[in-house]
Image (cartoon, grey):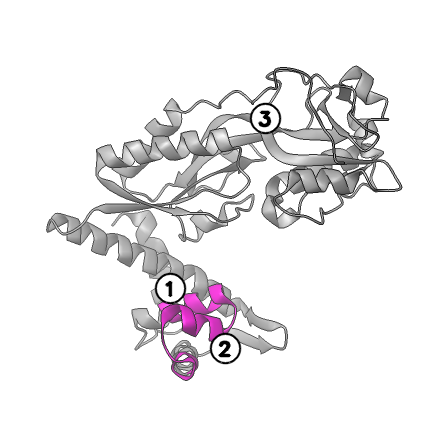
Amino acid sequence: MDQRQAEPIQRFASTGAGAPQGIELRHLRYFVALVDAGSFTHAAERIFIAQPTLSQQIRRLEEIVGTPLLQRRREGLRLTAAGSVLLDASRHVLSLVDHEVTRTRQAAGLGRQRLRVVMPPGLPESLAVQAAAGLRSAAVAAEVDVAWLETALDAEFSLIQTRRADAALGWLTTKPEALPALLDAMVLGEFEPEVWIPPSHAAVRRGAISLEELAGLDVIHGPRRAEPGTYDAWATVLRAVDPRFEFTDPPFRRSLPMTLAFAATGRRPAAVLTGPAAVAGAMPVRPSPPAGTSGMVRVSLARHPLIASAALVWSGDLPRPLQQMLFETADRLTPAAPLQAAGPVSLTTA
């Protein structure tokens, strides 16, 4: 165990006048499960114990630590300041224990290393497939088991920071060196959104819309929780043009055709902005005359002001062979060219 791994455990053990006596790993596992589930009922179901038993063990943990860890409110559970500290320490301790048990089993020839990789929904299919295939091939060669996690990521990659995942394919809205020290990253390429506008808009004739013109429309994009990093970064860019700008959440999720159809029904002109979907600046989009008055037309965004960098991000605490495997896999990945229609691009809603 290196000094960086040992420090959080030393801080945890030295809290208060003396080290808390009687804490067991199951107390920490129950506590983390409770916070992640958000309620005693859901947590008990996830870890297969009775709810009264879970409540009793959490009370016992608070007695050992000597302070409340959770506030029980009508709207749900909320961590106290002490609970937040213990949660971070618990995640680290449990991750370290699990990792060292895995190493012990490997030394005895009883198991293989495991890598937990987040593949968030909404990634361009070409990028997601290429990255997953590359990681799978590298893992097979290195005799590593991969566990795939399909869940949303925030801009800070907190799933990796809190050791609930080891690596992730996601979007950077800052430079890699601005990430927390625990994280390492390799950028795979820059992507931008698709932009769809009404057929009557003047930008259709040009095939490109300016940021100023876009900010003047109702822009349907989101919801934020799907891609909070790019959502906030792009909103900031548009607010530099219009300080009052706000995105409009789509009423339909995971269905671009339905969102386009909805946008065409508004009293005010509305645009639809997807998440990062195409390699930035790869090829201009050629719009076509819409088939009907309700047809939404895809155009380019002039000067490419809305960009997100696809990156493979991983924990710097991973064993060196796993980090090398991730680095080499990312180094071999190249963003696939966006799919371009043989002719102009349009989508009718009728």
Locate residue 112 relative to residue 3 in the image: left or right: left
Residue segment shown in magenta: 29-55
Task: For marks 3 and 1, give the one nearer the viewer.
Answer: 3
Locate residue 254 relative to residue 83 in the image: left or right: right
Q: Nearer the viewer, residue 149 or 205?
A: 205
Q: Secondary structure at mark 3?
A: strand
> Residue 314: x percent and y percent?
40, 40
> Residue 42: x percent and y percent?
47, 71
- Residue 68's mark? 2
> Residue 39: x percent and y percent?
51, 72
Please say if 33 is above or below 345: below
Residue type at numbered disc 1: Phe
- Residue 12's mark? 1
Q: Which residue is mark 3?
A: 278
Residue type at numbered disc 2: Pro
Mark sitting earlier along the chain (2/3): 2
Most frequent secondary structure within the magenta stretch: helix
